[in-house]
Image (cartoon, rainbow, N blue to C red):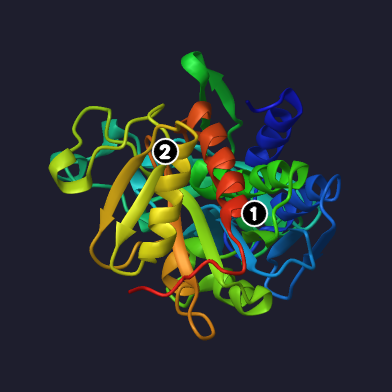
Amino acid sequence: MLSPSSITFLKRLLDAPAPSGFETAASRAWRAEAETFAEKVRVDVAGNSMAEINTGGSVTIMLDGHIDEIGVIVQYIDDDGFIYIAPIGGWDTQVLVGQRIRFLGQDGDVLGVVGKKPIHLMKTEDREHASKFADLWVDIGAKTRAEVQERLNVGDPGVIDSRSMDFPNGRLVSRSIDDRIGAFIVLEALRRYAEKPGVARVVAAATTQEEIAWHGGGALVCAHCINPQIAIVVDVTFATDHPNIEKKEIGEHKMGGGPIISRGSLISPVVHTMLRDTAKAHGMAHGVHAVGRDTSTNADAIHIAREGVATGLVSIPNRYMHSPNEMVDLSDVDDAATLLAEFCRTVTPTTDLTAR
């Protein structure tokens, strides 16, 4: 089970503001925790954080979880001190309306509120249309552009101002579950592997820029740096146990039903089978997600790094993705960490990763 200290660290990690390209706060928290047990901890030029166990191991396994979250960036400041923002990552703009924003200003955090024309003043046709970023502004209480610029500048990032919350039945809510939970799981798995290491060198990586990663993001840089033979990517997937979800299109991913192991076109069939065999050997509930093309995760970049990496994907069912209140079940998080640690112990120099 997750220890109280691990849960405390998880909440600290979730609450750190760290949108894509500006992951410093979360990455520092992750490395500080890693330094309490890992043999080697480092950071690269892309901001990726890495922690190792069994540095001289005969086979290298990369455990990847991206540490960035979606956010916003200051685009324009008008004469009256109102701030216009652009997205960092994929937003449903409707969830921004009326929210508080925490900007990472030059001298510390700056809070603002997202403004929009009141519904009383909208024409009927306007009420029927979804808000766009251009329809919104952020008010930090300033009266002039000069007053704003004493605290914020164009290019300063921000996130929704919210904190993680405990919910009944072992559920946890946070704005940054995607994919701070993956960054947590790979480090927790490394901690458990350290208690009884196998022969493999295992590197947990908290990678950057996934939410904007059409170019491969920090994970591609990190995979070249680590040079693994095997990689397991940990991300979130859509929970399908709430209203208005079509399981025939997405699959069945139930919160509390265990981690989801992907099977598909770019997933290594060897790694997939090893993951499922490991789960079965330890009596762990799990699901399978069919992926016919790319996965929209770091697996897409990692599996073609260097001469190719045998890559698997493990996901946590997540309700309300890319909203201020994403939700996961901590039992799935715990099981995923155990699954990864046990998987790493099964790998030996004679493990044949060739797809036959």
- Labels 2 and 1 touching (C-beta < 8 A): no
Quarter of the figure that contains the N terminus: top right
At label 1, the amino acid type is: Thr
- Residue with the most extreme bottom position: 307
Q: Looking at the image, which residue is at 63% across and 39% down? A: 14
Please report the residue visible at 70 percent of the width from the left and 70 percent of the height from the top: 58
Q: Amino acid at mark 2?
A: Lys
Across and down, in percent, residue 70 comes to: 50, 53
Q: Residue extending furthest front? A: 350
Question: In the rendered image, which residue does mark 2 sit on?
Answer: 280
Can you tell which of label 2 and label 1 is closer to the viewer? 2
Give the mark count: 2
The crowd level at tag 1 (other Cα within 10 Å; few <14, some 14-19, many 20+) is: some
Residue 30 placement, left or right of 276: right
Q: Which residue is mark 1?
A: 144
Quarter assignment of residue 273: bottom left
